Amino acid sequence: MTVKLGPNRYGKAETRLVRVVRDGTTHHIKDINVSSALSGDMEEVHRTGSNAAVLPTDTQKNLVYAFARKHGVEEIEDFALLLARHYVSAYPSIHHARVEIEEYAWNRIPGRSRHSFVRDGGEVRTCVVHHDGDGRTTVVSGLTDLVVLNSTGSEFHGYIVDEYTTLRPTTDRILATAVTARWRHAGDGERPPYARVRECLLDAFAQTHSLSLQQTLYAMGERVLTTWPQVCEVRFALPNKHHFLVDLSPFGLDNENEVFYAADRPYGLIEGSVLREDAPDAGFAWE
Amino acid sequence: MTVKLGPNRYGKAETRLVRVVRDGTTHHIKDINVSSALSGDMEEVHRTGSNAAVLPTDTQKNLVYAFARKHGVEEIEDFALLLARHYVSAYPSIHHARVEIEEYAWNRIPGRSRHSFVRDGGEVRTCVVHHDGDGRTTVVSGLTDLVVLNSTGSEFHGYIVDEYTTLRPTTDRILATAVTARWRHAGDGERPPYARVRECLLDAFAQTHSLSLQQTLYAMGERVLTTWPQVCEVRFALPNKHHFLVDLSPFGLDNENEVFYAADRPYGLIEGSVLREDAPDAGFAWE
Amino acid sequence: MTVKLGPNRYGKAETRLVRVVRDGTTHHIKDINVSSALSGDMEEVHRTGSNAAVLPTDTQKNLVYAFARKHGVEEIEDFALLLARHYVSAYPSIHHARVEIEEYAWNRIPGRSRHSFVRDGGEVRTCVVHHDGDGRTTVVSGLTDLVVLNSTGSEFHGYIVDEYTTLRPTTDRILATAVTARWRHAGDGERPPYARVRECLLDAFAQTHSLSLQQTLYAMGERVLTTWPQVCEVRFALPNKHHFLVDLSPFGLDNENEVFYAADRPYGLIEGSVLREDAPDAGFAWE
Amino acid sequence: MTVKLGPNRYGKAETRLVRVVRDGTTHHIKDINVSSALSGDMEEVHRTGSNAAVLPTDTQKNLVYAFARKHGVEEIEDFALLLARHYVSAYPSIHHARVEIEEYAWNRIPGRSRHSFVRDGGEVRTCVVHHDGDGRTTVVSGLTDLVVLNSTGSEFHGYIVDEYTTLRPTTDRILATAVTARWRHAGDGERPPYARVRECLLDAFAQTHSLSLQQTLYAMGERVLTTWPQVCEVRFALPNKHHFLVDLSPFGLDNENEVFYAADRPYGLIEGSVLREDAPDAGFAWE
């Protein structure tokens, strides 16, 4: 029997970096978490342990800090591209680089101090960039943990009913989810501003009278695609954060969609992609 | 040898409740997490398992939901007081009640919909209320996980130096922490608005040129106490979230307080209380 | 511009189930976490919200409990197959089912009681099963969070050195990782016993003198493949849990690989697949 | 109004240390997490930021590593005592030291290698030691997250029933909890072996036919106290990890204590202390 090496990659995960830019007494901060994963001539290291083709993950960490100092960090996609291209161009044994960045938002504390910040605990901005030795590049932007809730405007009925059904149909329920959305760009050029895509997602969530979470998912994706021609595909993972109406009748109380139990597990999980008819092939974009 | 029962309490922890109030098409939501802990005639249940004096934790959960429907939920301290007083007055075997509530904030999604919300992922508002059969009541309000950062205006030097010292003094560092603050009220009457106390904390953090995190802690407590006469004590737990300047000299780069590594563990932890000279005895307020 | 629906699936995640089987006074327990994800005729629900083709996730939860009662739960792969086949055969609108199960191990508390257990906090056993309407079935078994450490027998040197290198080569370091391993079966028939595959992984980890974590990964995969002909591929995610030797020289102390700092972030992350030359196509097995 | 400083302490939390001891080719490892908290002449640092009395938390971290090298690490209580006494004796401004240690267990991987380990993911061993300038010392040992379950031998009935009761009494239920137990020693001298106290807890849990979780708590404490004269008090926090019998009657199935839903939140929480009649005053032991 012969054994062989399949797909593989290695890198440094979760290099935490805060960069401060001083503009007189006004400071700006950038708070990111960088993970790189490299592939290439990796047969030898797996079979014999020879590291001749290996760029140590420690060096990958150093590169993140050094490049932040040398080139600054503006849009996370651009910083990820910078790193990914460097890995592939500077090291012949590296044929493919994947760089993922998370960004944590901070707001200025109002007042005289221009160097004081409070962390915005909302969603985390994300990106995943791929670049390979053939010059192919993909850029996926995204966000995760954007928690949203409609307290009405959501129904659920007309589903399959069989011997295992106990759920009752409803024409008015809470719909809540923690949005993970990632949008793939048609090229590695111009991209829509992050805040505007986020706005599309929130608007579509708020404005869709929902008969199912899938319908809301589709509406959110469609809104982004019809607003931003640079985006060719949007993928979602939407946990249905169930809010169950509490039965208060044992206590002689009615409960007209007022008091809910916010459940943890189990939860529904809706995953899906919405894309343009003519979207280019995704290649390795989602890997 | 004789064995006896010491201090004890029991209750239902983390009852998650979302309440929706409809004002025409404008909805308001309240998202809380309630934990109750009761004490009283508990010898028998510990020694023989007789539950005659025990209010099941399941019933405590029911009470949270029923009371939310009957009485509404406005300030979390008031809802906690309502529950605590009920436990002690309605059940002779219960002599003392502790009710703790966490509140998660939501913001309205801008636009036409008045029933759409996005969770504010910032700090969690908290309170702990005690009430006992002798009519003694304590109210502690608070917040946790308010993450703040000053990118300058912080020094650290002049400390004890000995054979185990490797830290170098600095006159300019990042100061960052995740504030847990709890403020004790002198009585169970009027209380300062939560948002205004939070503002005091942020202002004092931002405006204090800090020579040590302890100094910042004290300034934050003092600010609350001098602004709000109803508050008699403030307690803090402030993890020092270290941001280490990365040494880029091996790469021929300087690093003038620009690129930092945000560390996880270990971390400094500063805990302290600031109180009025004439603060009434805390009793069981902090338990 | 035309927008279309891409790949999608939906289901109930993390249905927690404990099953007790009584054999006289001797009890046996099974503690699992089941997630199902279904695909099929889902155009309508995304576009119009019509749920006519939708099996509610609530019903999927019911099915897990009902099937556990009806059919019992032995090997998690078999229970997953049972559910997956049912979804596809019983509901015409469902063309593909993915069922994932985690299993938590418990040990018997020694002594007279035969119904008392203590949870084994070690690794979690996992499986992912796919089944579609064309009768294709894939079974992947696995484990996650098996934390292992070699306190010697690990080297790292001979890697790429350039201007961003600061790491020093070593011929003796701690090698530690939290193994996530998944092994794909060539068919849906006989499978090697879980405990024996786990043993292969531990043995290979312990017996490999390691020049790189990749080498250890490959050795672990190869060991499983050469021992168990039913397995055609093994995939790993191995975080390199760095243990850094503490520099005690400022305190006049040597440190001959004795005192280490166990770091959290960043960490190396090594991912890779080892497979048979003649392994059948994976199809949707890893999705 | 005058504001003053109340109780306070500061230190380095969660210093992670792994120590390897080589006995020929047989290695032994110790994996701990150390947190120190110091109190003393801290007025100035809070009021003016003068750090003259402050031992930097960075130095506290150094001390942990240096002392591990100098003195080794055997029982965690002894290592904690060593550190606590050093802080108070070596630094005049430090009047009180609290040292807390967590220990993570590892098992040897069976086979030829004597340097290969797999982490035992079960409970975490803990201790908290206090020492002050007056020579008073307290030692509390403990464990946390010891997850245990009785699949029968647990009843719950005879409790208070009122208008808010919906729970039905039961004579056969699953009883499960994640034990946090801490045992206070009468002095700082001889202590019972950790493994034997753990055994007492497991035995008492398994052997107690339980009419309430409080009864089980008391039995566990009593068992430790009657077995080990050096222990004068045991404190517990026992979350009642509810396992609800699933109602399968809608599907035409009975369910005789066979299939359960393991719930997350809310959960019961039982806290209590069991102590000797003649236990010495606890002083600051539990702080």
Image (tube, coloured by chain):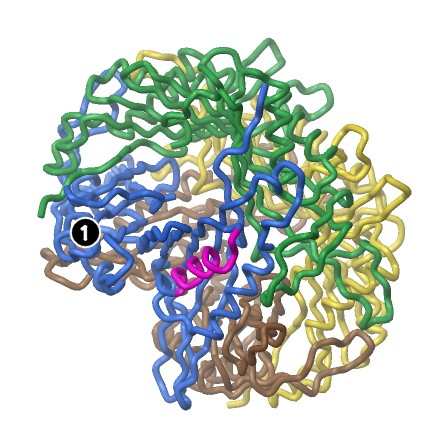
Chain colours: A green, B yellow, C blue, D brown
The one of A246 and B202 positioned closer to us in this rendering: A246
Above or below, comparing residue B12 to residue B179 in the picture? below
Residue D276 point in image, percent of width and height: 54, 83
Would residue B79 appear left or right of B221 to someone viewing this image?
right
Above or below, comparing residue A155 to residue A30 in the picture? below
User: Label 1 is found on which chain of the structure?
Assistant: C
Question: Would residue D275 be visible to someone looking at this image?
Answer: no
Question: Would residue C82 be visible to someone looking at this image?
Answer: yes
Residue A54 point in image, percent of width and height: 20, 27
For mark 1, give the secondary structure: helix
Residue C86 forms part of the magenta stretch: yes
Which of the image's four quarters has the C terminus of chain C? top left
Residue D77 point in image, percent of width and height: 38, 63
Q: Amino acid at mark 1?
A: Phe
Determine which residue is flagged by label 1: C205
The one of C134 and A92 positioned closer to us in this rendering: C134
Counting other residues with Cα less than 10 Å from the Cα at mark 1, is it few (<14), some (14-19), or many (20 or more)? many
Q: What number of labels is visible?
A: 1
Q: Residue furthest top?
A: A24
Which of the image's four quarters has the N terminus of chain C? top right
Chief secondary structure of the magenta span?
helix
Residue A128 forms part of the magenta stretch: no
Magenta residues?
C79-92
Would residue C96 appear left or right of B13 to someone viewing this image?
left
Residue beneath the point at 17% across and 25% down: A53
The one of D210 and D270 positioned closer to us in this rendering: D210
Above or below, comparing residue C18 to residue C186 in the picture? below
Residue beneath the point at 73% across and 45% down: A154
